[in-house]
Image: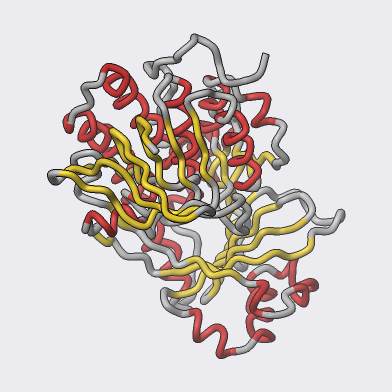
Amino acid sequence: METGVCVVGGGPAGMVHGLLLARAGVPVVVLEKHETFLRDFRGDTVHPSTLTLMDEIGLGAETAAVPHREVDSFVMAYRGARPLRLADLRRLKVPHPYVAFMPQWDFLEMLATAAQRLPAFTLLRSTEAVDLILQDGRVVGVRAEGPDGPLDIRAALTVAADGRGSTVRDRLGLTPKEYGAPMDVLWFRLPRRDSDPEEGLQLYVDGGHVVVTIDRGDYWQCAFIIPKNGYRKVRDGGLDAFREAMGTAVPGLADRTDAITDWDDVKMLTVRLDRLPRWHVPGALLIGDAAHAMSPIGGVGINLAVQDAVAAARAVAAPLLAGRLSEADLAGVRRRRLFPTAGTQLMQRMLQNAIIKPALSGAPVKPPLPARLIDRFPVLQAIPARLIGLGLRPEHATGIPVADGSPVTTP
């Protein structure tokens, strides 16, 4: 098979990048190693920057139709202290002043459906990239395994959007710089009752425990944060002890922790924070988690990856159409995205050290002064709202060619 661009990975970055290039008239093949997008506890915070992008490419109505819950503020609660409001997205002057919590698989299916209306777009499901095709030191395609056996896809450009365990990155021998994370995360669900308050997203901090709860309408999605490499110790302590710790950290949910019936109900996310010093080689470009793994703090990972995808499409679409893609075009993607990526990672590291690490140590903790000031002076809540909701450099679809001048929505 031959194409203009082979995108490895059908996550948010890969699907958005493939859609934008196909919309420009560049032939694109996206490889998704699973038959469906259905994987539980994937990042599903779609922020104002991504929602605005969907409007720009004509998918605003279809995105709004995806089942979701809108959250416009983030709250932190320390045991024994009054809850503090840390971010108020209603203060943003944007079309969507909220974070939309929507199942990632539904969001990806919506993107896939829209992209497949474009003649230049091909999605190959159940097709996994296993190696790269090299010619004279240049990547010229991907070797994959699909439902019908081995498949070679030759392409002018290969884009790695295959996450923090990127096969493309491994085959290229690229090693990211690790910045460290003091935590891992255990994800699970607890029932939500009609009498429960509508809290959106809350961070609960207690000596030894840190928990995030997300109001998903009919259930609570919970993130129980544990010390790095501490999962074995938690399991060895037993399920009853884990339920008790959850109830202690979030007393309002203590009466339903028995919904965690065994360890299969709990999924572990190994937290990584890293970044490649170089995001491209001749014939290949890495974006999203393949180029920089983000901490779950702020839930910004999806949106940083989508912004990478937009910046990359803007950089390569016109050169690909003209048949003159250069290494300078590829290098320009990292040059544009380095500031927002490194800046966001720096803030995540600061928050890890200021809030998460002390709390997990078991020592007595109290709200840090900046958090108390942000809560006391509501106008300040627009600052973290902007950093979370829009990022340090939001990307837009302007400047990306459109083949026929029309959006991807149906008439």
Location of residue 348 with respect to 181 vertically, above or below? above
126 with respect to 216 (left or right): left
The x, y position of residue 104, in whole percent, is: 60, 47
**Taking the image as drawn, is residue 349 in sight?**
no
**Taking the image as drawn, is residue 351 in sight?**
yes
212 with respect to 153 (left or right): right
Q: Residue furthest right?
A: 194
Q: Nearer the viewer, residue 322 or 136?
A: 136
397 with respect to 349 (left or right): right
Q: Residue at x 62, y 20 (%)?
A: 409
Q: Quadrant of residue 28?
A: top left
The x, y position of residue 242, in whole percent, is: 63, 81
Q: Residue at x 81, y 56 (%)?
A: 196
Q: Nearer the viewer, residue 141 or 67?
A: 141
Colour approach in the figure: secondary structure
User: How many numbered circles are shown?
Assistant: 0
Q: Residue furthest top?
A: 405
Quarter of the rendering occupied by the C terminus: top right
298 with respect to 340 (left or right): right
